[in-house]
Amino acid sequence: AQTVTQSQPEMSVQEAETVTLSCTYDTSESDYYLFWYKQPPSRQMILVIRQEAYKQQNATENRFSVNFQKAAKSFSLKISDSQLGDAAMYFCAYRRYNNNDMRFGAGTRLTVKP
Amino acid sequence: DVKVTQSSRYLVKRTGEKVFLECVQDMDHENMFWYRQDPGLGLRLIYFSYDVKMKEKGDIPEGYSVSREKKERFSLILESASTNQTSMYLCASTAGTATNYGYTFGSGTRLTVV
């Protein structure tokens, strides 16, 4: 089974600074999708960004971008100009192409200091 | 606004009780999922369903069953609740397989078994 590893249980960043959250995954597949989800204290999981494995270009959504290294099986999330509202649990997730079930990492709790 | 609705935000049940967790989605999604979320373990897949009356076991199905009689509703059943089933339960749904769509999640049910 595919596994997703987030090696940083907690991270902290100063408001307006940049932070990078790490994620590695294990798979023998060549086609798959990767996701970052945010879970604020409200508990509502929010999709932050997604990446298709066949795309070499890294995905970007406003202040959020990824560094996708397919050979290294690495998928890190960079948050630029951090805001207080970015404080949340962040989950990295993997989904095989043409398959429905998604695998999640253990999560990283991000604190944003004013 | 598309939604996945979980019937209870908090639930307290006694050991040995039969517990029903309900989830309803209004997006006409084929696929629905039940996860449990525990600190340090992330989200673990319990069961999923890709069609009415169809179900598949996830990684931790023991002690749980599911029911999907209608497309929009997916129920998780704890036949005889135990204290080790105290957890956060998240329901999610998504459209068909060959897409890069992420999941849409409900707000979670925090279940305490005493």
Image (tube, coloured by chain):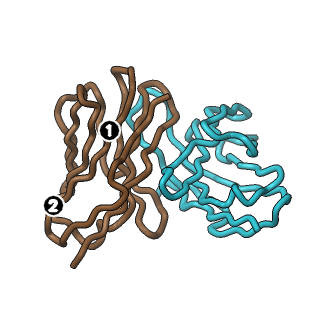
Chain colours: A brown, B cyan
Disc 2 residue type (three-letter): Thr
Q: Which residue position holds label 1?
A: A24
Crowd around label 2: few <14 · some 14–19 · many ≥20 (10 Å): some
Task: Give how far across and how far down residue A34 sits, in percent.
Answer: 35, 37
Q: Which residue sits at x=75%, y=45%?
A: B63
Q: Quadrant of residue A28?
A: top left
Seen from the viewer's position, the closer of residues A93 and B106 is A93
Mark 1 — on which chain does it sit? A
Residue at x 22%, y 36% (from the top left corner): A68
Front-most of B10 and B17?
B17
Element carrying mark 2:
loop
B16 to the left or right of B87: right
Instruction: Tell me if B79 is positioned left or right of A109 in this view.
Output: right
- Labels in figure, total: 2
Quarter of the figure that contains the C terminus of chain B: bottom right
In percent of width and height, residue A102 lies at 48, 38
- Residue topped by disc 2: A18
Residue A92 horizontal/vertical position (percent): 37, 46
